[in-house]
Image (spheres, coloured by chain):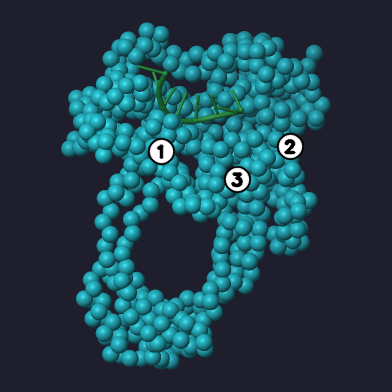
Amino acid sequence: MARKILCVAEKPAIARAVATHLSGGSFQTHSIRGNQYVKNYEFDFNFGGPWGNCSVTMTSVIGHLTGLDFDRQYKGWMSCPPGALFEAPVQEDVDKDKLPIAENIQNQARYSKALFIWTDCDREGEHIGSEVRNQAKKGNARIEVKRAKFSNTERAHVLQAARGPVNLDEYQANAVAARIELDLRIGAAFTRLQTLQLQAVAEILKEKIISYGSCQFPTLGFVVDRYLRVKNFKPETFWGIKVMLQREGKKVNFLWKRVHLFDRVAVIMMLERCLIAKEANVVKVVQKPKSKWRPLPLTTVDLQMMGSRFLRIDSQTIMKVAEALYTKGYISYPRTETDQFDKAIDLKKLVEKQFPDNSWGQYARELIDGKFRTPRWGRNNDKAHPPIHPVAWVSPNQLNANEKKVYEFVTRRFLACCSDDAKGQGTDIEIQYGEEFFHANGLIVLERNYLDVYVYDKWESSQELPTFERGETFEPTEANIFEGKTTAPNYLTEPELIGLMDANGIGTDATMAEHIAKIKDREYVVTNKRGSGRTSVEELIPTRLGIALVEGYDNVVSGLPNSISLSKPFLRKEMELRMLEICAGTKTRQDVVQQSLDMYREVFIHTQRRIDMLKTACRKYLVDDATS
DNA sequence: GCAAGGTC
């Protein structure tokens, strides 16, 4: 009887894909009791080396199996003071709806010699792997545990992963365990404290949950921050000099090197010196090739930002649609931070798959006929997933409207990455007029290249400039002073917010959209449509409650040394750094949990002590001011 | 009734 190996993936789609490759396409499918998504696939596979030919059961979980929660006696909101949640005992249990999946793993482990873990190759995947191991050991304490390391479900790569298993990375699993405990304790403690304290302040807060989370609050902070900058903005008048020349029937506007100044008298004096000089002198005529770079390989954050901007689909919807396209096998895994294509991926083969398309098939053909270029190399690599790209062609009539848009975007972006930069000829002319310098720039687009397929970028030829020669002089047709006013920044848009979250390490590519949805749901922010028609954008504006919370917390810590407001991303960033230390093996999980809890406990104590600051802010915006 | 992170 062949040895049996149990394989467990992070999600059903991966279990199926891996089973397909390992079995060569012939496997038996069995449903499990109690869950309609998880299946067991059975087949034989030769793992080579010490394992040899084995009978395999390939199955999956559906994300995390377990959740952490407080012991029963701490679950009631009145059961203890909120601060006690920093120490209250916690317990890890299999989620109720995951029990059949855990049981399936226990049962299958009973007859297996070894467990191969096929979770995603990232930090959370390592933790999910440890959850799977715990269940398997319950069924069979002596089962040997290995981990398959793979970052895409391309056939050769999967076979390689199966034949070269490694060990689970306990450090990474521990880092996630620390994160889970911290998020729970800190989130629950602050949420209970502020909800219980603030509900009584205003009528409209009576039934509300006023949640705190280490991600949702900094997200709110960004929105409020921008709102205050808009609100406190004072326009300033500026002045500048513009110079115009008519030559060869063309009007050339020269821009001032100083752009503009805030001192009118000074600008007038400068202009007068120009006028006295009468003649302007051409000091520079440069013709040089210009190029507009093709985009970088597509990451999740970029997909969400571009999606909001060009497809007019909000980031949460984008991710749902991308997930569906992935599950159906049309695009690669849509959650990735990587903007580098691994050298091992056969990009040309992927381009060829797009030949049948009516809109960009011809373009794909031209790439293969000689225009193909190796994509640019970005700076990020999560070592888990490749950039988002199409893996198979799909006819548009197989897709719904949103799927069509997202698939088209992913594909055009991919083809653009494999194209040459756009090329053009630029002309820079600089003149000296009196003591001031001015310049005019011209552009002729010579080769559009990637722009032909990547319709989201614009690069247009400017009006052609007349001929100038270095050293020549001319008398400008006009030289005037102009006046302008600085304008207020706009409210934050969703793509801008995602950019800020990304830059500050708030949330993951998969959860950023959820945090934004959460602060809308909690009524900390609302969205408003700016402009109309095709150019309209959704902007985020904090509610009175949102402003009150940020102002309240800023007041709670103001004047205190080393205390950073909860509305700022700093504390979360700190936590992230400590997780990295666990991964590196320089700190233990217990150290990090204790250290981080101490840090947040200090803020918590200040908040309790100065709770009136929070209450006052809420009263100010929700009671006194509520009618204005 | 609390969080954030997986995924359906």
Q: Is residue A521 above or below residue A463?
A: above
Label 3 vs label 1, nearer the camera: 1
- Find numbered disc 2 in the image and state the secondary structure of the residue it sits on: helix
Is A583 left, or right, of A549 in this rendering? right
Which chain letter goes with mark 2? A
Coordinates of residue A622 in the picture (x, y in percent): 27, 32
Give the numbered dot on residue A526.
Answer: 1
Q: In the rendered view of the protein, which quadrant contains the C terminus of chain A?
A: top left
Which chain letter goes with mark 3? A
Q: Which image quadrant for residue A385? A: top right
Q: Which chain does the green colour mark?
A: B
Q: Residue furthest top?
A: A73
Q: Is residue A252 above or below residue A10?
A: below
Give the numbered dot on residue A155.
Answer: 2
Residue located beneath label 3 in the image: A387
| Residue drawn 43% across the image and 92% down it | A472
- Find numbered disc 1 in the image and state the secondary structure of the residue it sits on: strand
Is A475 left, or right, of A155 in this rendering? left
Q: Residue furthest front?
A: A627
- Find numbered disc 3 in the image and state the secondary structure of the residue it sits on: loop
